[in-house]
Image (cartoon, rainbow, N blue to C red):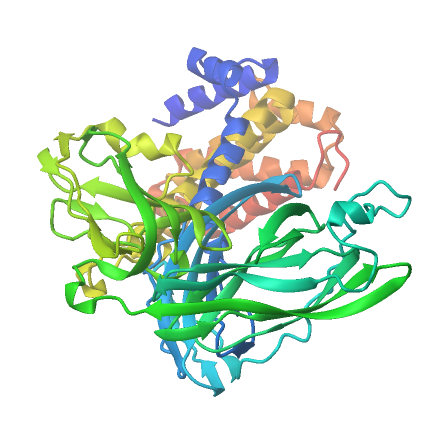
């Protein structure tokens, strides 16, 4: 066995000296795929598995549109949740706020990608908007509430809110508009164009139209404020708006110039220009008065004259809804609506998703009703609605709801019901959206079914069915489980082994002599280990093992041929400037080895420990000497 080991070592050492590989497989691996390349590869894999620990930072924040709310205004509470990875959110219910009544909730989601510091950074966010109406004046606060994101709870901050009485808007911005164009240098028409003379008997007034109108509760009444005049009006500055009780309002239109048109009012010809148009949304029955506009008209009649104006008209009679005929699915929608729908696909595989779109067009109180909800338990899992608005003043335009539906079983399925009802203002009756008979073909799943969202990174992934939270399984994060660290530990150990192996291959290729010396040191340690054990056990095998280990080491270190005799090897060592005392000790040890071959076993075991110490001194002495014979 020792001869076989020695032969293998000699062959390895000889090949290393010549810079040759030991085998064809070694050469192929080194040429086609350097082992040094594996270390950064496995290091990257291990860092990738540790990535869940290094990432984090879910941000949860709340804000309001105003901290001081008028009794006729509305409060919007916005909850924003964002993270660098996709979010798993339990849809938070609307918090109960003292002195306010909750009216509606809308949600939206978005994602963005940016480059920061040479790296691509993704941000995924979900926004929830809660709309409240004040009930009475006073001080209150929005309490802190809990939001569950990625199976963890986050608490929001409380916000203080003040509710005040309806007052005139003293901060109304002034609006100045040029007079209508004319033929004189100042931009005025001649008096004949106005059907009047140049005296001060002209008439200029501000009228809210329609002067009287009837609407049902909740329907937005549009009131237009016109400047009527038969005088030369240079400009008009809107100074104030006096509000009354019983409604909310928003600006529907406000021109920046006085664009006149010819009209006839109460038997007289006038020029009129639109000053402002408001959307008034009543929140109680009875007689209401639209806001009163106050402003200053600057007249020209051989000089400038300012005239104070207050609007007249704008009376609104609000009728109650017939509550006894209210259908299921009515959440407060009042308006002249046209409702349509569409389905993204009618054939899909189990595991895929389809998008159901509900579009509402027309004029109505869009901000006063909530999104329709699919009825659960009909073979589909339905998400919360994603809302997209294209509205003017929040009352006129289009609102689109997008739902993601995932089938739970295969076969022929029919879409679940989506109850939505509204009160048709012009017809004076309730109407309901009827889900048509829509058959969805669901086939068996395949591998590509579960990968379809890789090609659709913007499609929604988080589902929010109307189920209680305790029905969902609680998943633990991978780094918190013991099995996760088993492959991580194996990868780290494998990376260390690959790094050592690649270093040896690189050293063998670039410095064969140094590689051979280190290999000889390892072989010497192996033989010394066996010789040391034999000496401690008083075994007579110590001497042949020690002699072979010593000569193999010297043959590798000083390139001594194995076929030389002992005297020839010692002679070559003298030529390499080896210290004489070290050579004398080596000769003494070799002489002990020769004598031990012919001694009885009992006599050979007497000096084993002394000879072992002598061999250790010899090895240490040669280890301190470089190849040129100089001590290190």
Identify the residue shown where x is 68% and y is 76%. Answer: 170
> x, y (%) of residue 579?
73, 37
> x, y (%) of residue 547?
49, 33
Q: Residue furthest top?
A: 24
With 576 as the anchor, is 213 left or right in this view?
left
Q: Is residue 28 visible?
A: yes
Q: What quarter of the picture does the C terminus occupy? A: top right
Quadrant location of residue 221?
bottom left
Q: Nearer the viewer, residue 130 or 250?
A: 250
Q: How many marks?
A: 0
Question: Taking 62 as reference, is 24 above or below it?
Answer: above
Question: Taking 412 as reference, is 3 above or below it?
Answer: above
> x, y (%) of residue 154?
42, 69
Q: What quarter of the picture does the N terminus occupy? A: top left
With 66 as the anchor, is 99 left or right in this view?
left
> x, y (%) of residue 6?
44, 24
Q: Nearer the viewer, residue 64 or 228?
A: 228
Identify the residue shown where x is 61% and y is 68%. Answer: 311
Identify the residue shown where x is 19% and y is 30%. Answer: 349
Q: Is residue 552 visible?
A: no
């Amino acid at each position: 066995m020792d001869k076989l080991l020695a032969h293998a070592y000699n062959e390895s050492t000889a090949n290393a000296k010549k810079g040759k590989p030991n085998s064809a497989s070694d050469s192929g691996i080194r040429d086609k795929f350097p082992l040094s390349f594996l270390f950064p590869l496995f290091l990257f894999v291990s860092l990738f598995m540790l990535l869940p620990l290094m990432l984090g930072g879910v941000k949860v924040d709340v804000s309001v549109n105003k901290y001081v709310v008028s009794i006729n205004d509305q409060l919007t509470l916005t909850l924003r949740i964002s993270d660098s990875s996709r979010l798993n959110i339990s849809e938070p219910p609307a918090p109960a706020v003292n002195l306010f009544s909750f009216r509606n909730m809308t949600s939206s989601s978005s994602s963005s990608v940016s480059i920061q510091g040479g790296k691509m950074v993704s941000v995924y966010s979900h926004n929830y908007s809660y709309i409240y109406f004040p009930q009475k004046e006073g001080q209150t606060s929005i309490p802190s509430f809990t939001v569950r994101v990625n199976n963890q709870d986050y608490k929001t901050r409380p916000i203080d809110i003040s509710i005040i009485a309806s007052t005139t808007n003293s901060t109304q911005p002034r609006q100045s508009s040029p007079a209508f164009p004319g033929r004189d240098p100042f931009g005025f028409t001649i008096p004949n164009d106005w059907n009047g003379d140049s005296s001060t008997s002209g008439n200029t007034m501000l009228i809210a139209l329609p002067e009287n109108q009837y609407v049902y509760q909740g329907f937005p009444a549009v009131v237009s404020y016109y400047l009527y005049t038969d005088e030369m009006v240079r400009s008009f500055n809107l100074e104030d708006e006096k509000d009354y009780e019983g409604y909310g309002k928003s600006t529907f239109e406000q021109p920046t110039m006085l664009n006149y048109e010819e009209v006839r009012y109460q038997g007289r010809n006038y020029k009129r220009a639109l000053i402002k148009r408001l959307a008034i949304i009543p929140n109680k029955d009875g007689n209401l008065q639209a806001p009163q506009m106050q402003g200053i008209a600057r007249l020209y009649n051989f000089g400038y004259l300012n005239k104070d104006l207050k609007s007249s008209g704008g009376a609104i009679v609000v009728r109650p809804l017939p509550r006894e005929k209210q259908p299921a699915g009515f959440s407060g929608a009042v308006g002249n609506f046209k409702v349509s729908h569409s389905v993204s696909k009618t054939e899909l595989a189990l595991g895929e998703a389809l998008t159901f779109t509900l579009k509402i067009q027309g004029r109505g109180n869009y901000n006063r009703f909530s999104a329709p909800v699919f009825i659960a338990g009909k073979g589909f899992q339905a998400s919360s609605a994603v809302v997209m608005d294209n509205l003017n003043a929040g009352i006129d335009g289009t609102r689109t709801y997008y739902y993601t539906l995932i089938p739970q079983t295969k076969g022929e399925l029919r879409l679940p019901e989506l109850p939505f009802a509204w009160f048709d203002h012009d017809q004076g009756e309730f109407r309901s959206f009827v889900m048509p008979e829509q058959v969805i073909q669901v086939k068996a799943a395949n591998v590509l079914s579960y990968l379809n969202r890789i090609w659709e990174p913007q499609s929604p992934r988080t589902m929010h069915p109307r189920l209680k939270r305790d029905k969902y399984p609680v998943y633990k994060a991978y780094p918190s489980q013991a099995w996760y660290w088993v492959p991580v530990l194996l990868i780290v150990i494998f990376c260390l082994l690959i790094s050592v192996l690649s270093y040896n291959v690189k050293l063998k290729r670039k410095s064969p002599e140094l590689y051979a010396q280190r290999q000889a040191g390892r072989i010497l340690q192996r033989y010394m280990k066996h010789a040391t054990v034999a000496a401690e056990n008083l075994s007579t095998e110590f001497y042949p093992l020690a002699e072979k280990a010593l000569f193999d080491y010297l043959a590798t270190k000083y390139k001594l041929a194995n076929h030389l005799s002992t005297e020839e090897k010692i002679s070559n060592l003298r030529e390499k400037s080896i210290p004489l005392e070290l050579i004398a000790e080596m000769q003494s040890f070799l002489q002990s080895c020769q004598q031990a071959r012919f001694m009885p076993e009992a006599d050979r075991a007497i000096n084993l420990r002394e000879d072992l110490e002598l061999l250790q001194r010899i090895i240490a002495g040669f280890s301190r000497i470089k190849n040129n014979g100089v001590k290190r």
